[in-house]
């Protein structure tokens, strides 16, 4: 009974759960899973091809046209390789870890709205076998918090893989991973809160609904990237890249220092699961970026069915981020460990916290009709005070740190 | 808890039984296992069971927060600390120390107190009407935290901040 009500945000379950609703849900699960796997496969190919273009080489070009089936060939090959269990490994945890990495990567995708009828004031629903529903697997009332929870569970895959391998380098990799992910989760959560504040909802469907349509002066779309004034978006992209352990934040698997990092001892399909999870997370995280800041699948639909345009807009927006990730990898050198921690703790967290408070003040002043000049002056004054305090604290910390190094 | 003899809540009661059993077994394993990392992993199972129970009670927000804070942050930090200092694979002979009687002195009165408070609050109340189940939405919950329970909430925050600063002061020697 309660479970039906928990899902009630989707109109599919408005009259309770019957056989049609169940079959539609199963269909959605299968389609979402297949779509995500194919997207992951193409992403691996896209990254390899694009990086080789940027490095002036050819890249995969044997399997299929433009080497597009290369991932499939690699996957098949990995499937037939031997499982190797290191003798010092903790066997049960060692076998469990790849799945802890893979399953949250898929679950994260469940809450991303991939399409829907958003054009001309549509509410994002479509008709599917005579039933009205959303084109997303689930729209839980906790919405985006579910995404944060899943990405925090994904830490365990990396962490336990490193520990259970019974080897030094993977252990170092997993210690780095856990510190990095915990550090950047705070900045990530705070920038998500900025979007929640502006859109007034935690549900991903509600976020897209509030971002659909015209925004400022009927020129810009009403996307959260504009309504939160850009800074939370930039912070979220940086924190998201760190959360994915992608370059320039890939200290977890820094080849020059740690062999292959946490997955050094893994082979065969278990390695493939880690590899897939990494790219699946990249695809899903791009989907989350789009949902939070770029209005998800919303956009104009000039001709043809609106849901098809939703798919096209979602694909284009997501691809832009996937391109950005590859571009990062091809151009940016890896962060040093202390730089990584400094960026997370001394810049991103204070800035996102300050920005959240600023947005809340602006929102409140709009509701209460406060004097805009006074509010603006107050905000600037608070930022200056905060910035100078942080600066002096950083200078002090650096002096102490240097003193320790000189004395040692 | 929900009454057993109301058929409306039968699935909830069955799942509560399963989750409660898993939680009890895991909680026992937390204290009996000979490996620190295994103890942390069993603790995750206990905390996940708590989240499951919150979902059965129709409060998804608290369940997700439970996962986010306890499983996603606190146990990760436990494991981080263990791995940074020592992370033995296999049994560790020095895991138990000789403070068992003291632990018993603390644990038993705590169990008695909590059991008494629960019994005193609910006695043998049963939910018998077949009304709609209560599902607390996120907005209702946040209203009650930031309006009715604002002072306790802020007090808990200040307490956590004090603990945080205390930890930094203890860890730094200068």
Image (spheres, coloured by chain):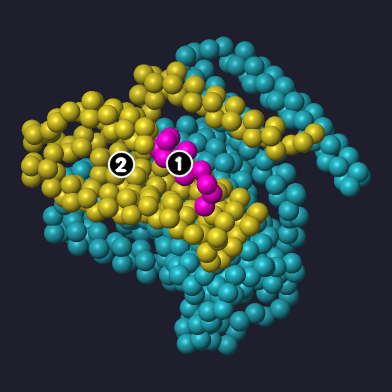
Label 1 marks a residue whose chain is: B
Residue B32, quarter of picture: bottom left
Horizontal arrangement in the rendering, residue A287 relative to residue B58 (left or right): right
A206 part of magenta stretch = no
The spot of residue A387 in percent (x, y) is: 73, 28
Q: Nearer the viewer, residue A46 or A72?
A: A72
Q: Residues within 10 Å of mark 1 (few under 14, many from 20)?
A: few
Question: Quick one: which chain is yellow?
Answer: B
Q: Is residue B38 visible?
A: yes
**Contact, mark 2 vs mark 1 (Cβ under 8 Å):** no
Q: Which residue is at 52% across, 35% downward?
A: A194
Residue that label 1 marks: B101
The quadrant in which the N terminus of chain A is found is top left
Q: Nearer the viewer, residue B2 or B92?
A: B92
State which mark lies toward you, 2 or 1.
Answer: 1
Q: Earlier in the sequence, mark 2 or mark 1?
A: 2
The spot of residue A63 in percent (x, y) is: 53, 86
Q: Between marks 2 and 1, how big is the CA–CA gap?
A: 33 Å
Residues shaded magenta: B96-107
Please give the label number shown on residue B54. Answer: 2
The colour of chain A is cyan
């Amino acid at each position: 009974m309660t479970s039906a009500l928990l899902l009630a945000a989707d109109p599919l379950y408005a009259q309770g759960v019957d056989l049609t609703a169940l079959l539609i849900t199963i269909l959605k699960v299968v389609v979402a899973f297949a779509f995500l796997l194919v997207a992951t496969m193409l992403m691996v190919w896209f990254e390899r091809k694009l990086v080789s273009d940027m490095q002036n080489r050819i890249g995969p070009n044997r399997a299929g046209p433009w080497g597009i089936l290369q991932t499939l060939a690699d996957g098949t090959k990995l499937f037939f390789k031997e499982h190797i269990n290191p003798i010092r490994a903790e066997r049960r945890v060692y076998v469990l870890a790849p799945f802890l990495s893979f399953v949250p990567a898929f679950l994260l995708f469940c809450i991303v709205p991939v399409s829907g009828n958003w054009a001309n004031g549509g509410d994002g629903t479509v008709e599917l076998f005579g039933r009205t529903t959303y084109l997303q697997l689930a729209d839980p009332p906790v919405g985006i918090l579910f995404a944060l929870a899943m990405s925090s569970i994904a830490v365990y895959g990396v962490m336990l893989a490193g520990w259970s391998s019974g080897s030094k380098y993977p252990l170092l990799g997993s210690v780095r991973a856990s510190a990095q992910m915990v550090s950047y989760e705070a900045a990530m959560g705070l920038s998500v809160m900025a979007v929640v504040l502006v859109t007034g909802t935690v549900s991903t469907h509600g976020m897209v609904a509030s971002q659909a349509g015209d925004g400022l002066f009927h020129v810009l779309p009403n996307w959260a990237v504009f309504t939160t004034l850009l800074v939370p978006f930039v912070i979220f992209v940086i924190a998201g890249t760190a959360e994915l352990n992608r370059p320039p934040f890939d200290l977890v698997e820094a080849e020059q220092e740690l062999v292959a990092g946490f997955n050094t001892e893994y082979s065969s399909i278990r390695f493939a699961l880690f590899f897939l999870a990494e790219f699946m997370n990249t695809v899903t995280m791009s989907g989350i970026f789009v949902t939070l800041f770029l209005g998800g699948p919303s956009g104009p639909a000039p001709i043809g069915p609106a849901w098809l345009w939703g798919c096209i807009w979602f694909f284009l927006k997501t691809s832009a981020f996937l391109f950005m990730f590859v571009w990062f990898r091809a151009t940016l050198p890896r962060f040093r460990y202390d730089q990584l921690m400094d960026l997370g703790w001394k810049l991103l967290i204070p800035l996102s916290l300050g920005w959240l408070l600023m947005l809340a003040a602006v929102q409140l002043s709009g509701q209460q009709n406060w004097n805009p000049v006074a509010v603006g002056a107050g905000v600037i004054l608070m930022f200056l005070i905060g910035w100078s305090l942080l600066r002096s604290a950083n200078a002090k910390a650096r002096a102490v740190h240097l003193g320790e190094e000189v004395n040692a | 808890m929900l009454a057993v003899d109301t058929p409306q809540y039968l699935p909830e009661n069955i799942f509560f039984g399963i989750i409660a059993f898993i939680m009890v077994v895991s909680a026992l394993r937390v204290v009996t296992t000979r490996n620190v990392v295994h103890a942390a992993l069993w603790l995750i199972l206990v905390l996940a069971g708590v989240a499951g129970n919150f979902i059965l009670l129709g409060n998804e927000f608290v369940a997700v927060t439970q996962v986010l804070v306890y499983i996603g942050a606190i146990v990760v930090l436990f494991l981080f600390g263990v791995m940074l200092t020592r992370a033995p694979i296999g049994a560790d002979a020095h895991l138990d120390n000789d403070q068992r009687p003291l632990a018993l002195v603390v644990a038993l009165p705590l169990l008695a107190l909590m059991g008494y408070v629960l019994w005193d609050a609910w006695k043998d109340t049963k939910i018998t009407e077949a009304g709609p189940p209560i599902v607390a939405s996120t907005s209702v919950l946040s209203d009650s935290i930031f309006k009715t329970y604002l002072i306790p909430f802020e007090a808990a925050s200040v307490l956590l901040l004090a603990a945080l600063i205390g930890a930094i002061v203890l860890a730094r020697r200068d």
